[in-house]
């Protein structure tokens, strides 16, 4: 799912929740492969140093048979900053009950100052995949898991410019290329919003953030490799966060993927955020 890296709320929390307050937002994303997604999200400052977040999203993509495939993503997270050390914990569930679903747990230990932060990230993923019947092979269910370890680094290079670097590498408990008669890529590779795009061997991202008055730009370069077929994807996105009043922002994102799995795909999203509290 593209929501793994596109949820803008994570980029806003440090600014909007400097004290106890809240963010609520909603947005849509579409791509040139007829994929479509909608999301609602929120973050609540329980105290000045403790935040609770939640996200709910739904994707719709077209299968190779022209059938709409729907999947749902739900996430809840908790962040506490002990100053300067902090910890983030989260759990999410996503998927489509007719094909692939996953329960994910994550944890991050980070160190943060006003101009610099570094985090060690861990994620455990528990997958269930329903293989349909093909020729003489009966339908069956396969379960497997994955452990991901990574790091995130963010630092300021001036009063209005910052850089964020992140990466995650996954170790799977099963060989996802074990069934040559029913390859995962034939079943799931319909769009950048498809479930198969979450089965990655590694993922790296570099983001440049630039403040221009009340507006904020993000320029992102991303790369990941699929675990099922070792296909590579390169992604470029540009985002603009623009105020629409004293307590609301709108964010536009335009991007392009060059993928060996699902081809060349352009995508566009719009999110609106509302802020409250002190």
Image: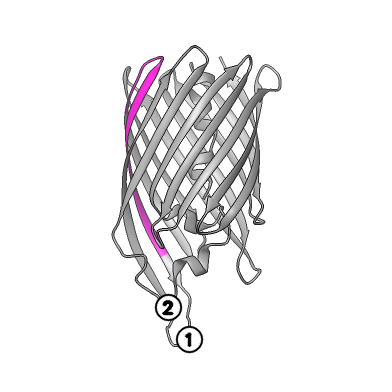
Name the image quarter holding residue 90: top left
Please tell me which residue lies in front, 180 or 99.
180
Q: CA distance from mark 2 to mark 1?
A: 9 Å
Contact between marks 2 and 1 (CB within 8 A): the answer is: yes
Q: Specify the farthest residue to the right.
A: 244
Q: Which residue is mark 1?
A: 135
**Picture coordinates of residue 197 (x, y %)?**
48, 54
Within-10-Å neighbours for mark 2: few <14, some 14–19, many 20+? few
Q: Is residue 94 magenta?
A: no
First reached walking from the N terminus: tag 2 or tag 1: 1
Q: Is residue 111 magenta?
A: yes
Q: Is residue 250 visible?
A: yes
At x 60%, y 40%, the residue is 40
**Picture coordinates of residue 129 (x, y %)?**
42, 66
Q: Secondary structure at mark 1?
A: loop
At x 50%, y 46%, the residue is 234
Look at the image and name its color scheme.
one colour
Q: Secondary structure at mark 2?
A: loop
Q: Which residue is mark 2?
A: 181
């Amino acid at each position: 799912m593209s929501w793994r890296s596109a949820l803008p709320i994570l980029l806003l929390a440090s600014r909007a929740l400097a004290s106890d307050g809240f963010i609520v937002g909603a947005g849509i994303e579409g791509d040139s492969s007829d994929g479509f997604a909608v999301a609602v999200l929120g973050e609540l400052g329980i105290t000045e140093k403790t935040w609770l977040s939640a996200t709910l999203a739904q994707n719709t993509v077209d299968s190779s048979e022209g059938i709409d495939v729907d999947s749902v993503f739900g996430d809840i997270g908790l962040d506490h900053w002990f100053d300067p050390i902090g910890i983030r914990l989260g759990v999410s569930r996503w998927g489509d009950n007719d094909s692939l679903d996953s329960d994910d747990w994550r944890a991050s230990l980070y160190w943060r100052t006003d101009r610099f932060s570094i985090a060690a990230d861990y994620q455990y993923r528990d997958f269930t995949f329903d293989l349909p019947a093909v020729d003489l092979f009966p339908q069956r269910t396969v379960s497997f898991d994955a452990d991901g370890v990574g790091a995130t680094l963010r630092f300021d290079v001036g009063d209005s410019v910052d850089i964020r670097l992140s990466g995650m590498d996954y170790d799977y408990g099963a060989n996802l290329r074990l069934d040559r008669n029913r390859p995962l890529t034939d079943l799931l590779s319909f769009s950048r919003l498809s479930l198969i795009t979450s089965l990655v061997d590694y993922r790296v991202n570099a983001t440049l953030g630039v403040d221009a008055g009340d507006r904020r730009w993000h320029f992102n370069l991303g790369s990941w490799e699929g675990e099922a077929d070792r296909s590579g994807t390169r992604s470029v996105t540009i985002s603009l966060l623009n105020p629409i009043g004293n307590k609301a922002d709108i964010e536009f994102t335009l991007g392009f993927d060059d993928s060996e799995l699902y081809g060349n795909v352009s995508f566009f999203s719009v999110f609106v955020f509302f802020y409250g509290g002190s």
